[in-house]
Image (cartoon, rainbow, N blue to C red):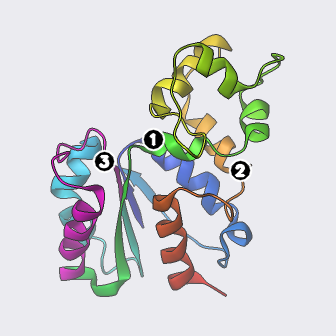
Amino acid sequence: MALVADKNMQFALQGALARPQALGIRSLTYAIRPHMGRDGGVRTTGADVLACDAGRFRHALMMLDFQGCGQEHETPLTLEARLDEQLQRVWGARAKAIVISPEVDIWMWGADNALHEVLQWQKATSIRDWLHAQGFDFDAQGKPWQPKEAMEAVCREQRLPRSSAIYEKITGRISLQHCTDPTFQRLRRQLVTWFGH
């Protein structure tokens, strides 16, 4: 069972879970539910919501974006540890919180070829070069500091309707084994611990 903050996160997770071999896990049967209260709702009531499902599911994930969750005075890892403690009261080691920093959109910025394909990018310049020319700054891994706004800018440029399905298509194509995002690595390690071969 996964409780997530919104449909973008739900679809990104679906795209990844649909590729169990790329994650290094066996095939799963799972349910993913977005929280109506988004990131802040997952943070404040997520453990209680998931407690109701402890008898129906073997494991639980609780996922939210750090940006917009209302606890930005903490570090993402401190918040994640606190949420893990809340989950463990009911689930023990069967549940894990994942606080994505800054937000799930950062996972979309893996390989250029996947982005170009999904976003139907035909320009001579790469998506990242185009974004740089639009004033976006990038970190040392080549990911935009404002990943959601960067994705929205590209979708506007391509006249693509903003859709959660884009997130599923991208995570369905990017390398899951070589993703350098620390949050995604923590998620993958937890999945391998629970569901590895």
Mark 3 surroundings: few (<14), some (14-19) or many (≥20) residues within 10 A? many
What residue did someone put label 3 on?
Answer: 66
Q: Amino acid at mark 2?
A: Ile
The residues bearing labels 1 and 3 have C-alpha atoms spaced at a distance of: 16 Å
* Outermost residue, front side: 140
Which of pointers 1 and 3 indicates the residue nearer the eye? 3
Q: Is residue 82 magenta?
A: yes
194 lies above or below 72: below
Q: State which region is magenta.
A: 63-89
126 lies above or below 22: above
**Which residue appears at 18% of the width and 65% of the height?**
48
Q: Amino acid at mark 1?
A: Lys
**Mark toward the start of the polypeptide (1 vs 3):** 1
**Mark toward the start of the polypeptide (3 vs 2):** 3
Secondary structure category for the residue under label 1: helix
**Which residue appears at 79% of the width and 33% of the height?**
117
Secondary structure category for the residue under label 2: loop
Q: Amino acid at mark 3?
A: Phe
Which of pointers 2 and 1 indicates the residue nearer the eye? 2
Mark 1 surroundings: few (<14), some (14-19) or many (≥20) residues within 10 A? some
**Which residue appears at 46% of the width and 45% of the height?**
104
What residue did someone put label 2 on?
Answer: 174
Answer left or right for 105 relative to 52.
right
Mark 2 surroundings: few (<14), some (14-19) or many (≥20) residues within 10 A? many
Answer left or right for 114 relative to 80.
right
53 lies above or below 116: below
* Number of numbered discs overlaid on the protein picture: 3
The numbered dot on residue 7 is 1
